[in-house]
Amino acid sequence: MYSDGGIFFDDIGSFPLPEGAKLNDISQERYIEIVKDAFLKKISAGVEVPTYPQFRDMIHMFMDLIQNPKFTESPYLIKREHAQIFELQALKANRMRICVTGPLELYLSIFGATSYTDILCNISESVARFLEMAKETGAMVVASIDEPSLGISSNIAFDQDEILEALEIASRPCRGMDCELHLHSPIFAELCSQVSGINIMGIESAANPDYLRLIDKRVLEETDTFLRAGIARTDILSMTAQLNDKLGVNLWENLPRMEKEIANMESCEMIERRLSNAYALFGERIRAVGPDCGLGSWPSQSLAVRLLSNCAKALESFRRKSTF
């Protein structure tokens, strides 16, 4: 378990590139500088367990290695020594949240609505090896397995037992420590609370507060599972569309005003209210909080930092007022 105890503040991972930067046009050295700088920005904003900045595509950054025959010992089973997350080389000594794209998400990206269980097992073992190698660096204090399609995509053809087995394999290195399952839907949260290597269900409850009411606190208690509550919205397209309708403007044409309006929309007070509501429902079953999802689609690093800072201030205020 994360040693500080109580509720901790983390982020999901993705982050905007600096203005004008494009992944295809920068050197490896420049990319490492960008990763280091973004990580420090997260820390400066108050993120207590920052995720390594995830600028690369969440599928390709893992599947390109898993599919490369030079790096595998059998189809979709990566050799242990090649299960490396490049960004960690730039952040060697830092304590962080390590996210790895989950086996179902990776499988779905290649095979769609099929059910080759042997391939799923190999991909699950590959995910486990990425987590093992990250854990050996000493940097991983919180892990996350990212399964945004679970509960949303109708193309997942595996039954519940197969889904649980895949997650058991993938999360094996995380037993005894905090490991989140990052979901975009709460439908499978209670089922996945049975997975022995995962102890935190991530729920996008800022944009969808009713999602929390689909989770039975008694199930969490029975399985000794916790929640990561989303307390700040990240659906920037929907947020901006709402503001455009309300204000009668196009904020995409005025980014400084967009930053001001989004910061007001996701104020410290609003974020703290969401946290208080989540805590009223689940109490000490709330283990982690932060933005719903990643911030990679946001228009600027400054706006992303401002949202993270508002989350930090909201949690600080909540802690002062609470007796938990």
Image: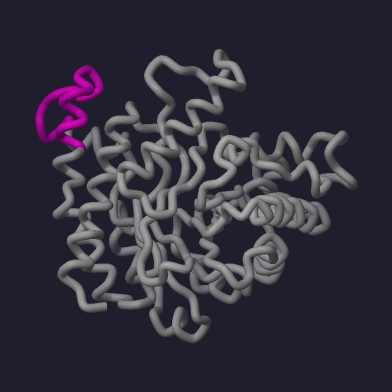
Left/right placement of residue 155 relative to residue 14 reads right
Range of magenta residues: 244-262
Residue 117 visible somewhere in the drawing: yes
Query: Which residue occupies the extreme right position in the image?
Result: 73
Q: Where is residue 279 in the image (x, y as percent from the top left)?
A: 27, 72
Foreground residue, 88 or 202? 88
Q: Where is residue 291 in the image (x, y as percent from the top left)?
A: 35, 50
Q: Tell me which residue sits at (17%, 30%) in the image.
A: 244
x and y percentages locating residue 283 in the rendered image: 31, 77
Q: In this view, does 272 lie to the left or right of 77?
A: left
Vertical side of 84 occupied by 259: above or below: above
Q: Which residue is drawn at 85% across and 42% down?
A: 72
Q: In which quarter of the image is the C terminus?
A: bottom left
Residue projecting furthest to the front: 93
Vertical side of 155 occupied by 151: above or below: below
Name which residue lies at 60% across and 41% down: 88
Image height of 249 relative to 96, above or below: above
- Left or right, 109 with reference to 230: right
Is residue 251 placed above or below 240 in the rendered structure?
Answer: above
- Residue at 46 percent of width and 39 percent of height: 14
Please check the rendered image and state whether residue 139 is part of the magenta-colored stretch, yes or no: no
Main SS class of the magenta portion in the image:
helix
In front here: 38 or 23? Answer: 38
Question: Which x, y percent locates residue 37?
Answer: 43, 31
Residue 159 seen: no
Image quarter of residue 174: bottom right
